[in-house]
Image (cartoon, rainbow, N blue to C red):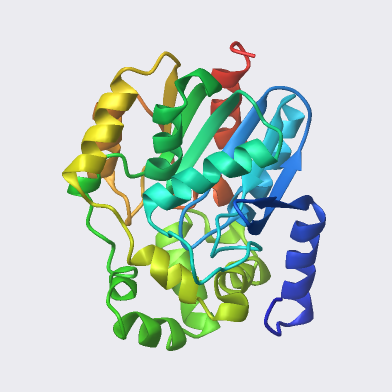
Amino acid sequence: MICSVNPEVAQVIGAHSAAGRRFEAEGVTSFAREQGEGPTVVLVHGVPASSFVYRKVIAELADQGLHAVAIDFPGLGLADRPREFDYSWSGLSRWLGQAIDALGLDRVHLVVHDIGGPIGCEWAVRNPARTLSITALNTILDPTDFRRPWTMRPFAVPGLGELWLRATPAALFAALFRLQGLGDPRAMTRAEIDAYRVLLLRADRGRAFLRIMRSFELTEEKRRLLSEGLAERPYPARIVWGERDPALGIDQLRNTQRTLGLADAVLLPSKHFLQEDQPRAVAAAIADLVAPLG
């Protein structure tokens, strides 16, 4: 169920829904948007997003001869929002593995963004034989060195998070989205930005999202698992980064480079949601890594 929205936003979400399929994993019904044929690329989103963030990249990857699949995590996008669910990074990583199995995918290339980084990379660490490559987009791979951006900080506090979510009208959400997310504000229509908000709130008014925001695992144990596991990976990796990101800045880029053991990164003139204003460049960087590997 999607809360009442204006027709233009409903049309955007309807087109998104029509481009994918429903599936069930670990008792949770979710949604995967997919397109193309060829080697499979699984695109892992973060917050406050869903598979919707990859819609432009998916089309570009399909044009590059790849099978692109973006999956909604429980509590976000078009997925169910169960009350009894482990919304921690570890819980979402376990569910991601169930989703990959439920979709009939075997060996995959991973693309991770935002908190999709620690979630997706944990699955990769535990499943090295099924991981063909990792492309990291503006993400968090050293949880002990992460500080929430000011726009996200209130969501971690019980009571305050509910107030902040309810007190953020569509116009303010759009302004903040453009401020932190877009290097080129013309890259998205207002209806597309409003679709993010609708897909975040939906029937539970964002309660599952708040549980995710309060379940970050910013621990030394998680840092060690990612650092040691990714250092031993048998597959290649690449970093593609929006260099003007005010949420996950150059310090997080350096952490990601250190964790993946990479000296270089593809830097794009974008902010946090580089998938929105640099989809062709993002897809080209992914395809350049993936194509020779098959």
Residue drawn 21% across the image and 34% down it: 224
Residue 32 spot, x, y in % from top left: 69, 49
Q: Is residue 242 visible?
A: no
Residue 207 spot, x, y in % from top left: 47, 76
Residue drawn 33% across the image and 70% down it: 151
Residue 218 spot, x, y in % from top left: 23, 52
Taking depth in this image into account, of 9 and 147 the one nearest to the observer is 147
In the rendered image, which quarter contains the N terminus?
A: bottom right
Q: Is residue 228 visible?
A: yes
Classify residue 201 by image quadrant.
bottom right
Would residue 87 be found to the left or right of residue 224 on screen?
right
Q: How many marks?
A: 0
Give above or below for 174 relative to 148. Answer: below
Classify residue 57 by image quadrant.
top right
In the rendered image, which quarter contains the C terminus?
A: top right
Would residue 109 be found to the left or right of residue 58 on screen?
left
Classify residue 109 by image quadrant.
top right
Give above or below for 79 relative to 268. Answer: below
Residue drawn 55% across the image and 55% down it: 73
Q: Residue furthest top?
A: 292
Taking depth in this image into account, of 146 and 283 the one nearest to the observer is 146
Would residue 189 be found to the left or right of residue 282 on screen?
right
Taking depth in this image into account, of 156 and 274 the one nearest to the observer is 156
Residue drawn 41% across the image and 72% down it: 210
Residue 244 spot, x, y in % from top left: 36, 49
